[in-house]
Image (cartoon, rainbow, N blue to C red):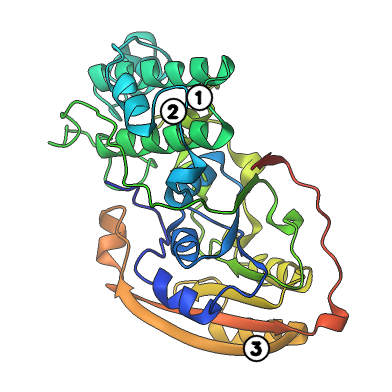
Amino acid sequence: MGVRYIGSKARVADAILDLAGSPRGGRFVDAFCGTGSVAAVAASRGWAVTLNDALPSAVAMSIGASVGRGNVPFAAFGGYVSAVEVLNAVRGRPGFLHAEYSPASGLTGDVERRYFTEHNAARLDAMRRQIKAWSDEGSLTRLEHELLLADLLQAANSVANISGTYGCFLKNWSSTALRPVTIQPRELPDRTTDLTSLVGDVTRVPTTRADTVYFDPPYTKRQYSAYYHVLETIHAGDSPKVGGVTGLRPWRDKASDYCYKTRALAALKRLILGTSARQILLSYSNEGHVPREQLINGLSEAGTVSLHEIKTIGRYRPNAQASANADTVDEFVIEVLPIQSARPSVASHRAVVHS
């Protein structure tokens, strides 16, 4: 079971890569990679892939979606499946997740949080601790470490007592939340992906004039760092100060300009104009802050702009209010072929790099 992600492009990823065409020497840069559904298709079509997101948990999930067997030999364990088997055999040991995101939270605070059962939270704590121990002792490569964290995030999500995001938990236990948590090894393709991953500001992602750059920015008011805060905590393996009913970790340092109606268009123009690339693909939908015509007009100074209507898909429904709104979303991609002579180079500074 994958992570249900707001704005997921899993159902339109092939259409997006059709627009990108075949690899021609550059990289496919997925600069808001999310869970990696588009990057995974790019990797399967032979592209060298660069991943970036502001959320480390998202980059880990994208790495998990994009790597091939050759990237993650797990030499210290005799293979990937063996490493997962060892993780699944780890006995539960309560830690931060147990203390803050299971009913045990009611023993030390004012809120009994029901994201996970106590049993599953303790197991998740123990498995996260084991991955850290392996990494600290040098038994895992960077990509192996991120793949196991991606698997752990999927396992946690499969037993999370939520309706879709971590913006709230359910009052009563769902049937899936009562199942014991288990990591399921994924089927890795028989390839070695040319993969680079970054965590940080999208405007600082290095690009070249040979690349195809794909942007899938947030385009509603929902801040991903708040809606997926539990996944961020599992990935970090830390013990942040949390509060409120949902146990929200500090997140405002990752608030995105693209989520604010008054800032979104200016932010998108700066992003596109500051990108060196052969081709820029920008995903958007009719739910976005910026009307389609206004967005096309705003980007026209960057180069030749084309609109591609991709698909009408069922609306994501993370809660009852969302279900009561429109049933469908019109997905489209704006293609920009930049005026190369006017394109400045982008700085190569970044916050974190995984290669």
What residue is rendered at 37% in x and 63% in y? 10
- Which mark identifies residue 305? 3
Q: Return the mark for residue 247.
A: 2
Residue 282, quarter of the rendered image = bottom right
Depth-wise, is mark 3 or mark 2 nearer the camera? 3
Q: Earlier in the sequence, mark 1 or mark 3?
A: 1
Residue 248 visible in this rendered orientation of the protein: no
- Residue at which label 1 appears: 242
Q: Amino acid at mark 3?
A: Val
Q: Foreground: 348 or 216?
A: 348
Which structural element holds mark 3?
strand
Q: Amino acid at mark 1?
A: Val
Kindly report the distance in space between the C-alpha atoms of the residues bearing marks 3 and 2: 43 Å
Where disc 2 sits, the SS reads loop
Looking at the rendered structure, the kind of residue marked 2 is: Gly
Observer-nearest of 300 and 260: 300
Could you tell me which quadrant the C terminus lies in? top right
Q: Position of residue 228 (x, y in %)?
A: 45, 42
